[in-house]
Amino acid sequence: MNMKVYERFLDYVSYPTTSKEDSDTCPSTDCQLALAHRLYDELTSLGLSDVRLDEYGYVYAVLPATEGVKAPTIGFIAHMDTSDACPGEGINPQIVIYSGGDVLLNDEEMILMRRDDHPVLDLFRGECLVTSDGTTLLGCDDKAGIAEIVTAVEELIESGVPHGKVVIGFTPDEEIGRGADRFDVAGFGADFAYTVDGGLAGELEYESFNAAAAKVKITGISMHPGSAKGKMKNAASIAAHFAALLPPDEVPEKTEGREGFFHLCSLTATVERAEMSYIIRDHSKEIFERRKAQFRAAVDELNREYGNVAECTVTDSYYNMGDVLRLPENAGVIDLAHRAMSELGLELCDIPIRGGTDGARLSYMGLPCPNLPSGGVNGHSRFEFTSIGQLNTCCEIIKRIITDAVV
């Protein structure tokens, strides 16, 4: 008997797959390989062809076209890793029938997902939610996408419905911006693809931030506080000064929609040394360039005031995939997804991503790749959840795209 999509999802989240930014290996953590091997075995057992797990932890597979069918080769991509923003080991998923109000995630520790903090819960009244126990994230981002892709392919095989060639790719290290680094675009062989990575059924994402990672290193001079006047250069205080030089309202917690930001991700500081890690984001390429210049100018200001104490690196991560996907030759990729969701009776909503997916980079690598919904809410959080209904509907979207593409 075929596995239901939620059953497959519950299996996948039992694999801890947190990625690690300071690792220089690919995948960045060995734990991701356990899920990669699990997926390799499963795709092989389903009878897919050209199933492979490469040396970097990428998993690929092919569902050949039904004989005589003409259709483009469509790819579906999801990532195996989870964010390190929240604990990702020992995930204890649970199914909760939601009748409204707050959700008690953990009785022993009295962890509540409060409706007032998460009004999106109102959309799920009467549904079966899938949550963690509040001590870890859940892993919807992006094991929901993986479960939906695998289930869609299994159900398509079982149904015997004619279809074109479908290619599958599961990537490591997306959460640390490396998911597309070693993706085999040529070997993948898709005419176009979709990532399945976040958002509610009906949402389509084909516009993303332009993104950069930035680091500031400050070298101070330590002196005894009693004789420090005119001699000490307190790197910790200088780091605080740097943060104050950036616009205080242009941060994630005060912006929305297409508004960009500077986000201080980490800070370590002593009197002698401070290091700050930022991400810089904006949907507008022009404003994105201005933000990077503003960041460098703030470093220059420190050096003028304190005497060459600071240095920075600013490295582009990815660009707005909308600049590629809005090209006339890619209109059909968007139209196909819209059509599939409309046929399922979903209310369409095109959302600019306040982040990025593997598809943002793949679109610039010659593989047009917007993002389909996977039904997850509150990613990177112990309040992450989905619903069985969302998992089922997002799986249906994938199947409908595949069958609608048949010429």
Image (cartoon, rainbow, N blue to C red):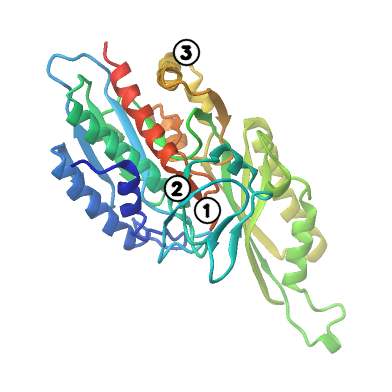
Label 3 and label 1: CA atoms lie apart by 35 Å
Q: Secondary structure at mark 2?
A: helix
Residue occupying image coordinates x 14% and y 44%:
45
Label 1 and label 2: CA atoms lie apart by 8 Å
Mark before the other along the chain sequence, 3 or 1: 3
> What's the amino acid at mark 3?
Pro
Q: Up-down: is 103 above or below 367?
A: below
Residue 57 visible in the shown view:
yes
> What's the amino acid at mark 2?
Asp
> What's the amino acid at mark 1?
His
Density class for disc 3 (Cα within 10 Å; few <14, some 14-19, many ≥20) is: few
Asked if marks 1 and 2 touch (Cβ < 8 Å), the reply is yes
- What is the x, y in percent for residue 397? 38, 27
Q: Residue tagged by mark 3?
A: 328
Mark before the other along the chain sequence, 3 or 2: 2
Label 3 and label 2: CA atoms lie apart by 31 Å
Q: Residue tagged by mark 1?
A: 380
Q: Of 128 and 314, which appears nearest the observer?
A: 128
Q: Of 399 and 87, which appears nearest the observer?
A: 399
Q: Residue tagged by mark 2?
A: 141
| Residue ranking furthest to the top | 407
- What is the x, y in percent for residue 389? 43, 37
